Image: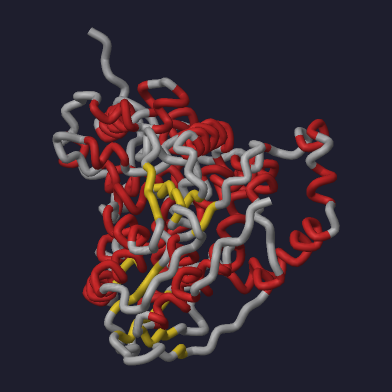
Amino acid sequence: MTEIVKRPGFDQDSPPEPKLIDACVHCGFCLATCPSYRIIGKETDSPRGRIYLMDGIHQGQAELSPAIAGHFDSCLGCLACVTTCPSGVEYDKLIAAMRPQVNRQVPRPWLDTVFRKLLFSTLPYPRRLRPLMFPVWLYQKIGLQQLWHRFPKLEQLLPKPLRAMERLLPPLSQRSLGEDWPNLIPAQGKKRYRVGLILGCVQRVFLPEVNAATIRVLAANGCEIVLPTNQGCCAALPHHQGEEDQARQLARQMIDIYADMEVDAVIINASGCGHTLKDYGHLLENDPDYQDRAIAFAAKVKDVQEFLDDVGLVTPLSPLQDTPLSLVYQDACHMIHGQKITVQPRRLLRQIPGVQLREPIDAALCCGSAGIYNILQPDVAEELGKQKVKNLLQTQAQIIVSANVGCTVQIQRHLGDRPSKTPIYHPMQLLDLSIKGERLPAQS
């Protein structure tokens, strides 16, 4: 009989819980909904396969090696398997516990290490990110980006993550380089609510027009809006990649910023951020100074669509064009699977006169963005992005609607590879135009 050689397993800092691992009955229902399994086609790159690996590591029958770690890195964290699982396996908690283990125990190639450090030291910090965007804005403004894309052989010389990041850059405006909001924006008409609005980090720089539209829609519907000037990242970016120390630090800062502000709700307009904000109680569960405060803060967090659907719109809406307008709504993973928000955005959009909603096939399939997954795992993300855009365009809708900055940037990138000129909007942008009585810009 061959003796099983015991190998080093998890460290003692919050490893995946054995009872959560044992809840998996290996039925395979998760395979059909797992985007990484669909693209890679290996059992070890599926939720079931990853749970097998976790169990092997826990039992000392497998080593947390670079090869095995790659199967955890390939997970998008889209949570589709959580929705699908008939046994109620909490894979979200398992993969969240697994990522820090990988980060602490598995050495990465030096280029990967440097690149990850660059991303996590800039993207979550708007004050650091904005100055870096000036040369990018100039690069786009004077036509160097279009010129660069005419030489694909030169592009191939760049490391894959850097090439992917360059391709994902949305068109920047001068507003991306700096925009100041007052600390308090009054409600229009009778004040119904006092809310805080989290501006985000990446969205504040890459899609500032979404925050501007959100502020106008909230104000038009009787909300006084508090905008703390020192707010930063909500912790979603590092949290999704297992950078737990940084994530906890950012979460504590966010809680402290809102500690003395009397607000009825804390509003967020990006689904990935919303999922993490609502999970602060779990993120800080081992912090005696912040655990209760984190739970109280998370209870006040509302996605802007969830909030407006609940309190109701009180301002008249106008058609966005003279003829019926067909929209296809893109369900972001952390909205549909994480926050269980599906009908609220559709109810809001249908209140705009003349709007017709169409549903794509495979609507719950991840677009491949997944935070910074499309930078760190560009090959899988590329295939998922192509599939998502194909499915959205097959609806022949005139407008694509997305409520998450990562999804928007990913979809824009793959729309750019097609002759289609289908525009993409955040729901708040459409509501903003409708409230102001403005028509959609003509498409070229």
In this image, 69 relative to 277: left or right?
right
Q: Quadrant of residue 303?
A: bottom left
Regarding residue 12, the answer to whether it shows in the image is no
**What percent of the width, then of the height, locates residue 327?**
44, 50
| Front residue (pair 433, 339) | 433
**What percent of the width, then of the height, locates residue 131?**
71, 70
In this image, 123 relative to 336: left or right?
right
User: In the image, what residue occupies the spot 64% across and 66% down?
Assistant: 129
Residue 173, placed above or below residue 46: below
**What percent of the width, then of the height, locates residue 255?**
36, 77
User: In the image, what residue occupies the spot 38% across and 43% down?
Assistant: 358
User: In the image, what residue occupies the spot 27% across and 54% down?
Assistant: 343
| Front residue (pair 148, 350) | 350
Residue 46, placed above or below residue 240: above
**What percent of the width, then of the height, locates residue 349?**
37, 59
In this image, 117 relative to 27: left or right?
right
